[in-house]
Image (cartoon, coloured by chain):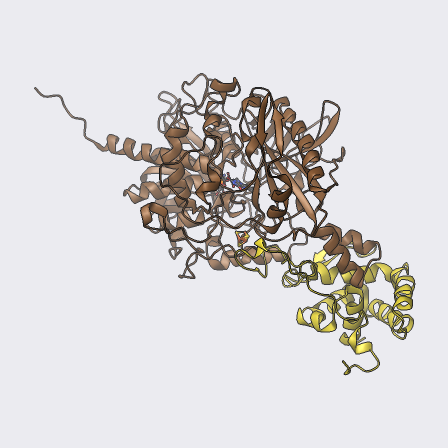
Chain colours: A yellow, B brown
Amino acid sequence: MSLDDFVAFSSEVTGFTEFDLLGTGQAQSYRDTVAGVVGEQGLAELLSAYRREVTELSDEQLRAEQLTRSVLGDPRLGPLARNIIKLWYCGVWFGLPGHEDTFTASPQAYPQGLLWYAIGANPPGARAPGYGSWAGPPRIPALPASPIPRSLTRNPSAG
Amino acid sequence: MIFPEGASARTSPAAVAGRVYDVVIVGAGIAGAVIADRLSREGRSVLVLEAAPAEDLTIKGYEAYLTDFYAAASKDNQSPYPVIEPVPMPRSTDARPIRPGGPNTNGYLVQNGPHSTDTTYTRVLGGTTMHWEGKILRMLPQDFELAEQRGQGPKWPLGYADLEPFYREAEREIGVSADIEDQRYLGLTYPPNYVFPMRGLPPSYLDQMVARGVDGTRVELDGEEFSLKVRPFPQGRNGIPNPAYDAGRGFVPVGAVSTSQVDEGERCQGNNNCVPLCPVQAKYHAGKTLAKALDRNVDLLAQSVAYQVHTDPETGRVTQIEYRHYHDPNSAEYQTGFARGRTYVLATNAIENARLMLASGLQSRSDLVGRNLMDHAYLLTWALLPEIAGTMRGTNCTSGIVDLRGGRFRRDQASFSIDIHNDGWGWPTGAPVSDLVRIVDQNTYGFDLRRSLVDQVSRQLLFAHMIEVLAEPENRVTVDPRYRDRLGNMRPVISFRVPDYTMRGAAFARRLSRQLFERLGAQDHTSYDPSEYGYVEFEGEGYRILGGNHLAGTHIMGTSPGTSVVDDNQRSWEHENLYLVGGGSMPTIGTANTTVTATALCLRTARHLLHELRHQDQPVALATH
Ligand SMILES: Cc1cc2nc3c(=O)[nH]c(=O)nc-3n(C[C@H](O)[C@H](O)[C@H](O)COP(=O)(O)OP(=O)(O)OC[C@H]3O[C@@H](n4cnc5c(N)ncnc54)[C@H](O)[C@@H]3O)c2cc1C
Ligand code: SF4
């Protein structure tokens, strides 16, 4: 499975655009981390289930139901999908049954965590916002226009 | 700030063995560093024995700390610091409830209980200030007179007025940012025209929101009425220099310690990571003071763990310090060395000073060494504010409520100050990562996940009540030959019970925070789990008391050898040429984080030592007629 597939899936489950995700510089490292733990096969299963069950649906409501049912709600794929979300948000791979190790994907993973960005903050100890920045209200970044990853829309170059 | 190249390798055990220094200092934390600095400034020969390796004090070493911190999956407050076999240190993650039948020997501290503490200190070059938060509160004048005014605690041999000039000197050394207008309360006085070296750090958006709800709240306690107000704390981190400082001479902030000159005095950038490590060294650490001292030929012998203080049985005078020098931080092999001086200063912090004295068989006749161990008791309460407060931004803590630091009520119950934590519920719950995990595990993803995070993290409010603890002889550090570290040093054995006086303060704090949350329209989410360490039941209610990292009291100062270990100069009553310095000398700790007071005491000791050495230098004048 290609990096693009991984990033498209990640975009939908994290709520960040593919552009944002690639901007962290961590996509390849995260993909390799996941494959390293569950194997290429395990990752491919997840991504193909997503492609098969979700990507063809254009109705947002249906899409959400389907993603919850066949991916997040799947006893085998769900834990893996949730772990990928957590990886993007804080750089940590959490132990799973059968793969108990909890670890940070790389020292750069943590400063790139989306968790802090999502709430208008910065990861403690990294990407400092500057003297006095804390005195004003937080700048919480706006959500993308659509939850559907851009590479999966019928006409990726439009709009 | 330049770290003199090669300074950490200037001497060796062999070279040290052939010298008698004016002063041998054990421990390169802030206490040892300021004494080394002041004595070397006057040309005194100084040896600093330090347990930890010394290469760390370069930008490169500092960056390694940072990388380790980024890479650590569990970001507990010691995570940047290398675990090395010869010099173990406590970690908050070692704390466990203590089961009947034996101590918890899990971590470096052997915990006898009944209370299990997660207090820590850091055995690296620069000591625990590498790691500290850097809140700089002076003790109140009434804290020095608690015994006289309220009948509580041992007596101090000196008062606020005696220490005031040294507080100012410590504030210069640390580089304190605060606005003087905010720091005049409960009798805190300063000389006319005094200002802090740098302007106060702006209060966080969260502080401002809390202030709108809390300011003006009236509280009655022991017949006295208090009006609460959110107030910024003085900070040991670089802000904007105040041109009015030092009678208009201003102040130049000290920047990162490096082997080459880097930007001068970088300002705090709001990394919200002061604990455990400030990435830009905006926060003071003792390496800044050490670098100055090392530039003046102070000898630093690193990787040398003091093992025993030897004394002359007749005179009680210290004759030498025996230390264990290891070559390889990954091995427990060592060679024994001896260091000799005219005077000796133990500056290894309250627990380690007592440990070393007791391991050396130097229990004082008053049996007070190691007793009266104190540490602030922290009670946390947490809630969700009705609006987005921008939590998780700024330094760990910019403001708090200090109005209950003093008052008549102290005859019955502990005083406390309240910190408003900019890092939300991080301390009790592991937020925001724990929130992320919880929300994702509910299969919330995508936009809903982002919205939930904002909703559940950016509204977090945490009050940390820092509650006074008084000296109790049964709260103590001991040693036991059964418990040793890999280098053969006896480990500290801690017995600690949270005094009822403190718990009455805690109970009051809990009630008050319910009231404040209500005023703020905040939803109380506080809960204390009886199965966790630190759980205390008091008068039918459960609380969780966490460690304050403000270790004090194991060698208290006083006016006589029967009631204290050291005199007002921190000089041992029983060992004339020995000084036990730092928080351990404090008979009370009030509600001030201990370091600025301990540093002021050390600066006072340095002045005394200079005087003492000069006096000893003088040839005995023969009386002639
Ligand atoms: C998380 C945290 C937050 C804190 N926040 C604040 C705050 O906001 N404000 C405040 O005032 N205080 C704070 N403190 C407390 C403050 O850090 C300490 O009071 C202060 O650093 C103590 O300085 P010291 O020099 O006495 O001891 P230390 O800094 O502990 O230094 C002791 C030195 O001695 C060395 N040593 C130890 N044993 C031996 C031995 N046997 N032989 C040779 N060397 C030895 C150690 O390696 C170390 O270098 C905090 C502490 C922690 C842990
Ligand atoms: S907020 Fe940051 S830059 Fe400021 S002192 Fe803390 S860690 Fe350093």
Up-down relation of residue B217 to residue A95 (above or below): above
Q: Would residue B8 be seen by someone viewing this image from the given angle?
A: yes
Q: Is residue A63 left or right of residue A11?
A: right
Locate the N terminus of chain B and report the quarter of the image it occupies. Answer: bottom left
Locate the C terminus of chain B and report the quarter of the image it occupies. Answer: top left
Front in this rendered view, residue B158 or B11 = B158
Residue sitting at the far left: B625
Front in this rendered view, residue B209 or B479 = B209
Front in this rendered view, residue B175 or A139 = A139
Figure label count: 0
Residue B445 position in % (x across, y down)? 81, 61
Residue B156 position in % (x across, y down)? 44, 23
Q: Is residue A108 left or right of residue A85?
A: left
Residue B146 position in % (x across, y down)? 50, 22
Up-down relation of residue B103 to residue A111 (above or below): above
Q: Is residue B141 left or right of residue B223?
A: left
Residue B160 falls in which quadrant of the image?
Answer: top left
Residue A55 position in % (x across, y down)? 87, 73
Q: Would residue B498 be seen by someone viewing this image from the given angle?
A: no
